[in-house]
Image: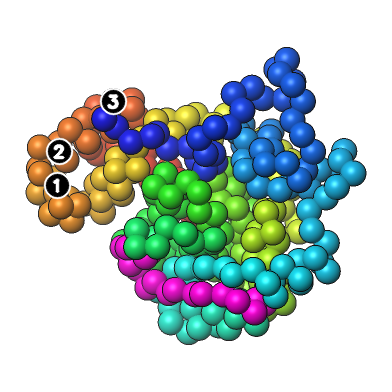
Amino acid sequence: MERDRFNPIGSRSGLPKEAPGSGAAPVPCAMENWHWHPRRFAYDQRPMRNKNCAEEAPTDGLTRDLSETTQYRLVIADDHPLFRGALREAVSRSFARVEIAEAGSFDETAKLLDRGPDVDLVLLDLAMPGVRGLSGLLYLRAQYPGVPVVVVSATDDPAVIHRCMDFGASGFIPKTLGVDAIRGAITAVLAGGIWTPPDIDLSAAADTDTKALLARFATLTPQQVRVLMMLSEGLLNKQIAYELSVSEATVKAHVSAILQKLGVESRTQAVIVAAKIEPV
């Protein structure tokens, strides 16, 4: 049986079936479990701020209290050791109790999450060995939907930031950001919010092309996302089978399913569709 299909938003089982305004009972206020993201077309199990509610997400004082008492587990995924070290230092100084694992490639990131699924946050670089563009973000949201992912990137292009958020990131941190701002961004996400640079307007709906792209990728299983990533890297079926420790027949079945779900007729066309989620 196929795995649960990829929800770019990372929604979990048991979510309400009706969106606000659909005739269903109103969604509870901000400190309840489920919250509707109009821009993302899905519920998310995070305590988000709600201007119509008396209660809001934790204040700075409460966040500081939580940072002193709560144990956090983070994964820093970046292929630059110096930046990983700087990010580790920033996180360590923000939380009294935190476990941090580092990964220098995408495969290492996936292995860390496989070994320890109780991760509170992944800080993901878009450009690292084993991943192209947003494919890594797509795979993490598919394979580990309960783990928030914050993209940490050398770019601060608004179009890239919007695309990352559309594909399910919980935040976007430009590497040019100061240490204090990075700490604040990570704290905000761990407190249940989302974070992007202040000049990014997240209220605008995704464009039609992005919605259509999201809908097509949403039909892929996590394994199919991984196979598509490897197709984009130019790997043959035999090589993909070796990397995933599956039979070549299984890979062929995945490729056929990918072509059907993406509405294309060849591997080359599938790679072209995948290239549309490149950040630049």
- Compared with 267, 147 (above or below) is below
Which image quarter: residue 107? bottom left
Q: Residue at x 24, y 39 (%)?
A: 268
Residue 67: x and y in percent read 69, 71
> Which corner quadrant holds the N terminus?
top left
Residue type of the residue flagged with mark 1? Val
The residue carrying mark 3 is 260
- Compared with 47, 77 (above or below) is below
Q: Which type of secondary structure does the marked residue at label 3 adopt?
A: helix
Magenta span of residues = 94-112
The residue carrying mark 1 is 246
Q: How crowded is mark 3: few (under 14 residues within 10 Å), some or many (20 or more)?
A: some
In reply to whether residue 192 is colored magenta, the answer given is no
Disc count in the image?
3
Q: Residue at x 53, y 56 (%)?
A: 149
Q: Residue most toward the top?
A: 23
Q: How crowded is mark 1: few (under 14 residues within 10 Å), some or many (20 or more)?
A: few
Residue 134: x and y in percent read 45, 51
Give the mark nearer the N terminus: 3 vs 1: 1
* Residue 218 in sight: yes
Q: Quick check: marks 1 and 2 in contact, CB under 8 Å?
A: yes
In reply to whether residue 109 is colored magenta, the answer given is yes
Q: Residue at x 43, y 78 (%)?
A: 80
Q: Which type of secondary structure does the marked residue at label 1 adopt?
A: loop
Residue 142: x and y in percent read 42, 44
Q: Which type of secondary structure does the marked residue at label 2 adopt?
A: helix
Kindly identify which numbered label has been placed on residue 250: 2
Foreground pick, 195 / 164: 195
